[in-house]
Amino acid sequence: MKIAFSKVGRSPAEFRYTEKGMTLSGTLLREGHHQVALDSSVSGEVTLFCDRCGAEFIREVSFPLVLTLTDRPEKVSDNLDTIEFLDGEIDIAALLESEIASYRSAYHYCPECSVKEDEIDIEY
């Protein structure tokens, strides 16, 4: 799902995109000539692999996603929550894919291996 940068106005425009059991929904609002505010949330079921036993499991997730989107190159030190879309289109599918990949890259434990403070393995 792509939305043209030029079509985003000064009043919040709602969107909803679902793929593979995950949904990105929220609003887009123009903040400046080259900036759009994304105020959204990611929710759904994501397939993960346990970092302790390797078992595949599904987890229900829901978290907010607030970003600034721009259609021109930005300095990295300015704002780390800025995403560049240099082709003039906001790619909602790419945003969702990126957030899912980022969530999967963290450590996750299946329900059977859930970490309790007294069970944490400490390596010296």
Image (cartoon, helix red, strand yellow):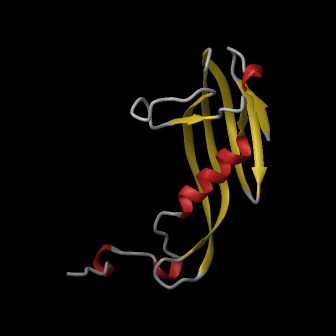
Q: Quadrant of the N terminus?
A: top right
Left or right of residue 74, residue 10 in this image? right
Q: Residue at x 77, y 21 (%)?
A: 7
Left or right of residue 32, residue 25 in this image? right
Query: x and y percent of residue 31 in the render?
Result: 59, 17
For the residue pair 45 and 84, the one nearer the viewer reads as 84
| 123 vs 25: above or below | below
| 62 vs 39: above or below | below
Q: Residue at x 72, y 28 (%)?
A: 88
Left or right of residue 47, residue 109 in this image? left
Q: Quadrant of the C terminus?
A: bottom left
Query: x and y percent of residue 54 in the render?
Result: 54, 83
Residue at far bottom of view:
53
For the residue pair 50 and 92, the one nearer the viewer reads as 92
Query: x and y percent of residue 75 in the render?
Result: 45, 30
Give the quarter of the image for residue 21: bottom right
Residue at far left of view:
124
Give the quarter of the image for residue 9: top right
Query: x and y percent of residue 28 in the render?
Result: 67, 27
Give the quarter of the image for residue 102: bottom right
Give the total of numbered labels: 0
